[in-house]
Image (spheres, rainbow, N blue to C red):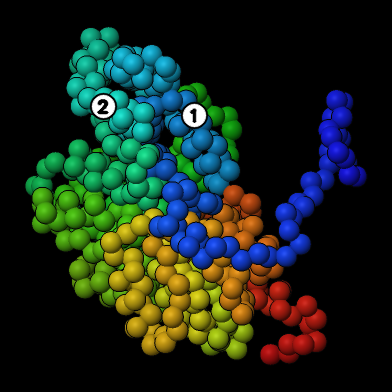
Amino acid sequence: MRLNEIPVEGIPYDQLKIEKIPCTPAYIERAPELVPARARTVVINPNRTCMPLGAMWAVLGVHGAIPFVQGAQGCTTYVRYTFCRVFKEPATIATASFHEDAAVFGGRRNLVEGLRNLVVRYWPKLIGVVTTCSSEIIGDDMVSFIKMARARLRQEIGAEKADRIPIVLVNTPSFAGSHVEGYDRASRAFVETLATVKDKPNGKVNIIPGLLYPGDIREIKHLLRHMGVEGIVLFDISDPLDAPLRPPQKFPYEPPGGTPVEQIRDMANSLATFALQPHSGQAGARYLERKYGVRAVVGPPPVGVQGTDEFLSTLSAITGKPIPETLLDERGRLVDSLADTFHHTMMKKVAIMGDPDVVLGVTRFVLEMGMEPVALAGGTASKTFEHSMGEILAEAGYTGNPLILNGGDLFEFEEYLKKQPRLDLIIGNSKAVDISRELQVPLVRVGFPIYDRFGYQKRPIVGYRGGEILLAEIVNSILGHQYPDDRTHQL
């Protein structure tokens, strides 16, 4: 059904079909001087999202906590919509609801009134105040505003009840950085605000998982459980953003799980802090190390054989607990899977995009499979990304010369791939879907966000078992694309 214009009565769903008509019949090479992101003042198809989203992600991982956004309604609606698309769960996020008057007079009244309404209606166990570009640009004195809000709460509900609700401020101007830095800032803000006493050693380890999905966090807990190690997982979204549906639900709804505030207060007494993703969590780990002498172990992401080996070996050295046979068996199964499938993955050309820590971890894993990376795009600019990637490539003895984009956009990534003589696979999030279709190359979905498929938030890629799942996804994508006839592959 082809229409020049939409009829007034609309189009029935069973007749609705949108055809993408290309502007040109064939690819026209762009002007080389306009392809690099650094040469442009415009971002085309960004490989990241805004800083407040990462901070809200973190707050939702604390038990009974509600993020409060000091900004406009759209800053909150966009994040709630994104979380709903990715996690298929409701995300309770409050907002100061800025309008034009706040831009002139400031957001003090909005914050004081908003926090008061949030407390008397929902009684959260913690409030994470997240700033946005608007509040940062107009220069809101957030520390003073929060003191005023707490004074009003004490007056209305009493000092005992008011002081029982911690308020953590996370400054996240959304005109800078990305969601990765927002999460990183939240990790420091929470431990700096809550972990203020070092008294009795607790024999535990702190885990700051970074922007990992619920399935990944459950896999990390699985590794800790088999090691016999108690861990404090900061921002544990495994239950809040993957909650069981067990009606009836009480109102106000409080999702299960999340890191209890008492555990965050106890993080200063732990043996060490593991920041599994250096770019999203390192700030909190480094703060605890400087302030209280809690050892910081920053990365590498526990993806694949070597990444998981390093995590467990360091965990064993710090706690004195041996790596059990059960985990060694899991490692053996992953190695066996690599041996079973190497003839499908060896020398396959792959491009990887997403958050820098995901790209680093997945790159090391595909090199273990014998694949050949041709382009590696980390969406958030980093001082260490290129150096870390160079170390991974050298460690694997890889002699290729892949394009490494440190914070570039996906326009530059796509233009480079279109000029490659061969590409077998793309690994990345849902933002790479159009590139995959354009190049007619399969896409293995990894990282945040994944919104065009269901269930990926439940599937781990970390640990040995997560490595098996990711390996199977990669191999099956290659087989499904390159071997349409089952008679052509008998191995």
Q: CA distance from mark 2 to mark 1?
A: 20 Å
Give the SS element for disc 1: helix
Specify whether 40 is left or right of 104: right
Which residue lies most toward the top here? 156
Specify whether 449 is left or right of 125: right
Pick the residue in front: 279 or 249.
Answer: 279
Q: Position of residue 441 (x, y in %)?
A: 66, 70
Residue 359 in view of the camera = no
Q: Position of residue 461 (x, y in %)?
A: 48, 65
Q: Position of residue 408 (x, y in %)?
A: 44, 59
Q: Identify which amino acid the numbered label 1 is placed on.
A: Gly
At x 45%, y 76%, the residue is 402
Kindly identify which numbered label has been placed on residue 139: 2
At x 51%, y 81%, the residue is 372
Q: Identify which amino acid the numbered label 2 is placed on.
A: Gly
Pick the residue in front: 312 or 32.
Answer: 32
Kindly identify which numbered label has been placed on residue 356: none
